[in-house]
Image (cartoon, rainbow, N blue to C red):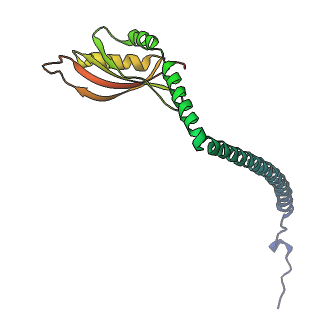
Amino acid sequence: MRVPINLASEPFRQDRPVLIASGVCAVALTALLCVMIFLIAGERARARENRIAVDRMNAQLRGLAAEQAKVDAFLHQPANSVVLERSLLLNELIERKSVSWTRIFADLESVLPANVRLISVRLPNIDSRNQVMLDMVVGAKDPAAVIGFLKNLEESPLFGPAQTHSALPPSQNEPLYRYRVTVSYAQKL
């Protein structure tokens, strides 16, 4: 039995570049792990600070709600309810009086085409955000003229988007197309 001893049959393997590349990758991955741990720790600290701030704000909110409840309970006592209702009525009257009819009509005149009539304007509604809503009825011989009026309203900085609620065709008593329109009005109160 012969044992071949030939060094050329098993060539020398060059594992050194693979080992060096593996070592470099391991060092890079370890550095990335350290960076990620640092970032996670920083995020945890910020999250803890945010939780503390939210808890502080919730405590303030609970305090304000308790104080508001005390004030509401005081105002809704029978002796104070008359004063509360009167003050609410007076505030509403003052708010309604603060809307200038002259200014409303002057601003409407600036956007109203010559072939459109303003038939009626209801008392303006003022919502909780102090936004004035105008409810009006306009008429014209041609529906296209009313559409032009609606475009003028929406293009004006004084008025918001207009909503048409109803449309009536001409009749024997009323020769105009009539449209009920609601629009927000930017008059400062």
Above/below status of 49 relative to 126: below
Image quarter (top left, top right, bottom left or bottom right) of the C terminus: top right
Which residue: 28% across, 29% down? 166
Above/below status of 4 relative to 82: below
Above/below status of 138 relative to 57: above
Residue 188: x %, y % from top left: 54, 19
Residue 70: x %, y % from top left: 67, 45
Residue 24: x %, y % from top left: 85, 56
| Foreground of the two, 68 or 111 | 68
3 vs 173, left or right, is right
Residue 56: x %, y % from top left: 77, 47
Image quarter (top left, top right, bottom left or bottom right) of the N terminus: bottom right
| Foreground of the two, 85 or 150 | 85
Q: How many marks?
A: 0
71 vs 162, left or right, is right
| Foreground of the two, 34 or 76 | 76
Q: Place residue 29 in its image quadrant.
A: bottom right
